[in-house]
Amino acid sequence: MSIAVCPGSFDPITYGHVDVIKRAATMFDSVIVAVSTNSAKRYMFTDAERVQLAREALAAAGVEAEVELVGGLIAEFAAERGAAAIVKGLRGTADYDAEVAMALLNRHLTGVETVFVMGDPALNHIASSFTKEIAAYGGNIDDLVPANVACAIRGKVKK
Ligand code: PNS
């Protein structure tokens, strides 16, 4: 039974994330989406909201994956679960530079390997941060994030 861990902030999950998680599900027997924390970031959504939005979005897209909140190191979580690999999506060279360091550090910590997946090029421009900014200025985000997420972002920016 091969397990993949797909970690990220998911603040919130986008169509780009859904695409990568879907691809991971075709390569591994099961996928755990690890909603985690990047200590350098400030989040729009709480831990519980990020988990809930990801669960709803994946269910709506028909993608089979567990979603869990992970408070500690991703490398330790992956090792505890006996994961075959961490799976991450790459959109381009900027992602690559940041992700290589993380992949090597995670392997240094527990020996866990990271597998990189190229997402759908049509979704390459999507990023959670830009989606939130577009919504804050009243722009249309319907093609960037699943419907439940678009609704939740609009709710936050209205406040
Ligand atoms: O979606 P993001 O913000 O690029 O995801 C980054 C994330 C949350 C996956 C990364 O910050 C992370 O793995 N955080 C958990 C703590 C950890 O394991 N840190 C060491 C990374 S080498």
Image: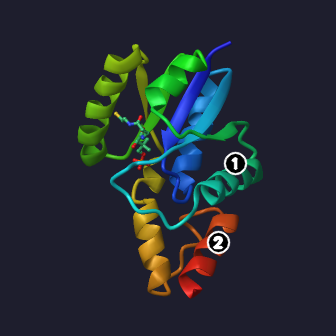
x and y, in percent, of residue 144 in the image: 53, 65
x and y, in percent, of residue 145 in the image: 58, 63
Q: Residue at x 51, y 58 (%)?
A: 11
Alpha carbon distance from label 1 to label 2: 15 Å
The answer to whether residue 85 is left or right of residue 106 is right
Choose between 86 and 80: the one closer to the eye. 80
Q: Residue at x 70, y 36 (%)?
A: 66
x and y, in percent, of residue 97 in the image: 23, 39
Query: Disc number at residue 76?
Result: none
Q: Amino acid at mark 2?
A: Ala
Q: Quadrant of residue 148?
A: bottom right
x and y, in percent, of residue 76 in the image: 48, 24
In front: label 1 or label 2: 2
User: Ligand 1 falls in which quarter?
Assistant: top left
Quadrant of the rendering where the N terminus is positioned: top right
Q: Which residue is mark 1?
A: 58
Q: Label 1, secondary structure: give it.
A: helix
Q: Quadrant of residue 84?
A: top right
Q: Which residue is mark 2?
A: 152
